[in-house]
């Protein structure tokens, strides 16, 4: 769908003032102002990302009590089980606590649900199985805060239950022995945006402090915790939580840790993907290379292998697991493309994305492990909340759905409003999952679309692209991009800057790139300056651009491309418009 471009207004006086007071280049001052950072102290806090900025773990609600319970269980030689989740955040959170407990000599194991057969979160059946196997204490990571009935089952089984989570809470909290959550009611932790791995890191840190003689941990614990910061960085980027405050610190220092001291399994995975050849890592390396491979294992029902990859001490096993998970990602990619094409065909045949407030799609045999990815791609393409439902081929089992939202609509609230049609649902504002009988899909679609239409204004339903600044291609030097990189790590809440340039010509015809022609490679020219551009996941642009005549306006993220030791400026194309039909305005945000 065509996007309306909104360019942040250029205020030369404010830019010059921040440039002088903070001692930063003009381009950095301008981008800081675009992010609402206007004074010198805020600028310095944002740019100077110190590990000491992490808050003491004892401040996190429930972390000290959880650490004490874990410490007591270690001393009493009771069996501890870390109960995780099957996405990259849950896997890294599981690995953080598992490795910490192993180092401290605990009798510990882990359980990660199978996405395809068990589903998300605490399961009464799994708790019963763990109790029969001798578990005494179960500590969840990245799940459990909404598991009221399951917590009651744990209590009946005599299991000590610690819940660590970061997801949305319901009106009733589970009756576990300890709850660890950054937004726990009645508490006032300063930053509520930690992911599951970030919460697990705080508990691991608190436990290490408790098992030490003082607040300072010994060298062995410190090394493990620094590796855990790298794991937490993966979970933070993968779970798309805001890269602000503590999350920004975790990712900045976690990237350094991943490069300098990766776990054995991650070292092998980075060798296979050639990330080991890069002089430094970026948040995009996590988001587009490491996290998708871990998530592929979870999506295809092999999450336990990804946790083993993150925790194994065997070089032979680490190599085998890294190779297998790398192959799983290729399989996931193929399934993703298949479901995406089928869902997109359904949209064109049965729906009107311009008129429909939301898209609820369902298909038999669509692999449940990739429907979340497809929903995300379609939500981005059509700027509509999207629900993709995988229906059972035999019609015996309920359908499994994944939903992705757009700005302005809280998915967990939307699903709750339509809950009468659902067997169950969970998630948060941007992403959620559900279970539904096939016979209820049409009624759910009608009510869900009606709810979305009532919540989102016509303006919110119009696709919009926010642009930081307009610049000529000649200004995109390596020096300028080096200055832009000072705002890294980039991600949710701190996106890589989007720039735009007018009066651009195609220097050569666009070419399909990547497996199945999913991406586009092109070369753009403006007043004698020629740069390569890539549009990821926009394979359809090859045909759309072929017949374009006249100048273009382009929106893009400038990056430094590193290939075989050479570094060059490259544009990651976000959108384009024919100059005569462009819909652009300057606006303050």
Image (cartoon, rainbow, N blue to C red):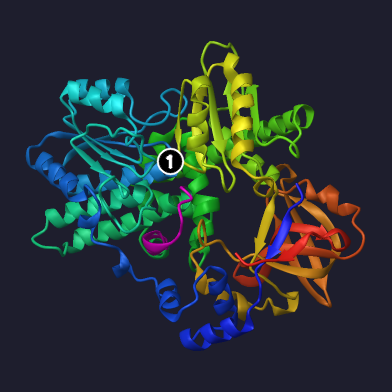
Q: Residue 496 appears in which quarter of the rendering? A: bottom right
Residue under the point 79% across and 59% down: 583
Local secondary structure at mark 1? helix
Residue under the point 20% across and 20% down: 132
Q: Residue 159 appears in which quarter of the rendering? A: top left
Q: Which residues are magenta?
A: 239-251
x and y, in percent, of residue 247 in the image: 40, 59
The answer to whether residue 312 is seen in the rendering is no
x and y, in percent, of residue 240 in the image: 48, 50
Closer to the camera in the image, 154 or 326: 154
x and y, in percent, of residue 303 in the image: 42, 35
Closer to the camera in the image, 306 or 468: 468
Closer to the camera in the image, 467 or 549: 467
Q: From the image, tell me which residue sits under label 1.
A: 321
Q: Is residue 79 left or right of residue 231?
A: left
Look at the picture and state if 528 lies above or below 282: below
The answer to whether residue 447 is magenta is no
x and y, in percent, of residue 581 in the image: 86, 58
Residue under the point 52% across and 45% down: 292
Q: Is residue 576 left or right of residue 14?
A: right
The answer to whether residue 246 is magenta is yes
């Amino acid at each position: 769908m065509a996007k309306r471009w909104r360019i942040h207004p250029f205020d030369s006086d404010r830019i010059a003032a921040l440039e002088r007071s903070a001692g930063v280049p003009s381009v950095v001052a301008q981008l800081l102002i675009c992010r609402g950072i206007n004074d010198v102290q805020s600028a310095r806090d944002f740019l100077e990302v110190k590990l000491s900025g992490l808050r003491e773990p004892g401040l996190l609600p429930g972390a000290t009590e959880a650490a004490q319970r874990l410490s007591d269980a270690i001393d009493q030689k009771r069996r501890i089980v870390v109960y995780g989740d099957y996405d990259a955040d849950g896997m890294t959170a599981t690995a953080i606590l598992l490795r910490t407990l192993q180092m401290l000599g605990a009798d510990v194991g882990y359980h990660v649900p199978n996405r395809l057969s068990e589903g998300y979160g605490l399961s009464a059946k799994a708790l019963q199985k763990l109790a029969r196997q001798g578990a005494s204490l179960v500590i969840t990571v990245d799940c459990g805060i909404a598991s009221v009935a399951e917590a009651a089952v744990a209590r009946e089984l005599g299991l000590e239950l610690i819940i660590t989570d970061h997801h949305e809470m319901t009106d009733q909290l589970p009756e576990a022995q300890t709850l660890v959550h950054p937004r726990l009611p009645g508490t006032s932790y300063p930053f509520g945006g930690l992911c599951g791995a970030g919460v697990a890191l705080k508990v691991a840190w608190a436990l290490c402090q408790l098992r030490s003689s003082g607040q300072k941990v010994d060298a062995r614990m410190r090394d493990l915790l620094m590796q855990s910061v790298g794991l937490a960085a993966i979970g933070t980027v993968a779970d798309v939580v805001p890269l602000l405050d503590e999350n920004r610190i975790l990712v900045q220092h976690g990237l350094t840790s991943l490069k300098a001291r990766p776990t054995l399994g991650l070292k092998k995975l980075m060798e296979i993907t050639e990330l080991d050849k890069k002089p430094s890592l970026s948040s995009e390396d996590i988001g587009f290379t490491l996290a998708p491979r871990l998530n592929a294992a979870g999506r295809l029902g092999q999450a336990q292998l990804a946790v083993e990859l993150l925790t194994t001490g065997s070089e032979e096993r680490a190599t085998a697991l890294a190779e297998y998970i790398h192959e799983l990602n290729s399989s996931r990619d193929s399934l993703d493309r298949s479901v995406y094409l089928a869902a997109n065909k359904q949209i064109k045949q049965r729906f009107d994305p311009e008129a429909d407030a939301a898209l609820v799609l369902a298909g038999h045999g669509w692999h449940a492990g990739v429907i979340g990815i497809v929903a995300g791609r379609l939500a981005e393409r059509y700027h509509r909340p999207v629900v993709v439902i995988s229906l059972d081929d035999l019609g015996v089992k309920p359908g499994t759905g994944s939903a992705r939202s757009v700005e302005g609509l809280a998915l967990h609230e939307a699903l709750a409003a339509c809950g009468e049609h659902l067997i169950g649902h969970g998630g948060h504002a941007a992403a959620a999952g559900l279970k539904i009988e096939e016979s209820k899909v049409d009624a759910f679609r009608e009510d869900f679309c009606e709810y979305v239409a009532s919540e989102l204004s016509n303006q919110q339903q119009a696709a919009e692209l926010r642009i930081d600044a307009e610049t000529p291609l000649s200004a995109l030097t390596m020096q300028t991009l080096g200055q832009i990189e000072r705002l890294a790590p980039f991600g949710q809440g701190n996106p890589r800057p989007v720039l735009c340039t007018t009066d651009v010509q195609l220097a050569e015809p666009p070419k399909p790139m990547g497996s199945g022609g999913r991406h586009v490679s092109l070369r753009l020219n403006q007043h004698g300056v020629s740069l390569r551009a890539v549009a990821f996941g926009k394979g359809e642009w090859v045909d759309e651009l072929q017949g374009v005549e006249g100048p273009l306006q382009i929106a893009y993220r400038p990056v430094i491309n590193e290939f075989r030791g050479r570094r060059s400026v490259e544009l990651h194309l976000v959108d384009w418009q024919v100059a005569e039909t462009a819909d652009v305005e300057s606006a303050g945000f």
